[in-house]
Image (cartoon, grey):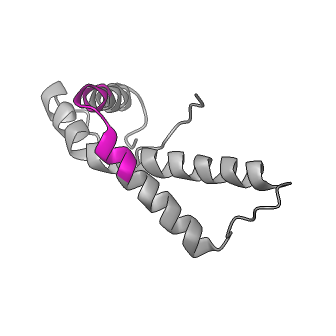
Amino acid sequence: MKSFTVRLGEISVEESDTDKILLEKARQHLPRALKRLGEKAGEEAWRTLEDGLRNSPLKLDRSSSDKAKFVQDMAREFAEKVTSSEKDDLVQNIFEQLKEQRDGDTKKV
């Protein structure tokens, strides 16, 4: 399985944010993070499909609208199939990144 990093986007982190506040921010960000992860998985699947069909007599419709629809469908399916445990792990990962931001120099994740 391939791994990739997904930027969390803009989450404001203040030095005064408690762990409880950061955990709540992480939970609030979960839907966006799931969408981004699903989109990344969709983009990777599209590239893999294109690569697999490169020398094949079958042709993939490569229009940008078809790719966008494929990626969005993949993102939706990804978010629907994520288990509660995986969601908890992702929230914990986001929380840890926010803590690092709070305790470090950078104020945006």
In the rendered image, which quarter is residue 19 located in?
top left
Q: Where 6 sits versus 70, above or below?
A: above
Please identify the residue farthest to the front as the structure is shown.
57
User: Is the C terminus in the top left, top right, bottom left or bottom right quadrant?
Assistant: top left
Q: How many marks do you count on the picture? A: 0
Q: Residue at x 56, y 74 (%)?
A: 65
Q: Main secondary structure of the magenta part?
A: helix
Q: Name the side, left or right, on which 81 lies relative to 19.
A: right
Q: Is residue 10 visible?
A: no
Residue 89 percent location from the top left of the image: 31, 25
Please identify the residue farthest to the left as the structure is shown.
20
- Give the camera-side residue of 81 and 24: 81
Residue 67 percent location from the top left of the image: 58, 65
Q: Name the side, left or right, on which 88 lies relative to 108.
A: left
Q: Where 98 sits versus 65, above or below?
A: above
- Give the camera-side residue of 64 and 55: 55
Q: Is residue 78 visible?
A: yes
Magenta highlight on residue 52: no
Residue 74 percent location from the top left of the image: 45, 53
- Give the camera-side residue of 108 and 27: 27
Q: Which residues are magenta?
A: 77-89
Q: Residue at x 75, y 65 (%)?
A: 59
Q: Where 70 sits versus 107, above or below?
A: below
Q: Name the side, left or right, on which 91 lies relative to 39.
A: left
User: Is the N terminus in the top left, top right, bottom left or bottom right quadrant?
Assistant: top right
Q: Residue at x 76, y 50 (%)?
A: 51
Residue 105 percent location from the top left of the image: 42, 32
Q: Residue at x 29, y 40 (%)?
A: 13
Magenta highlight on residue 86: yes
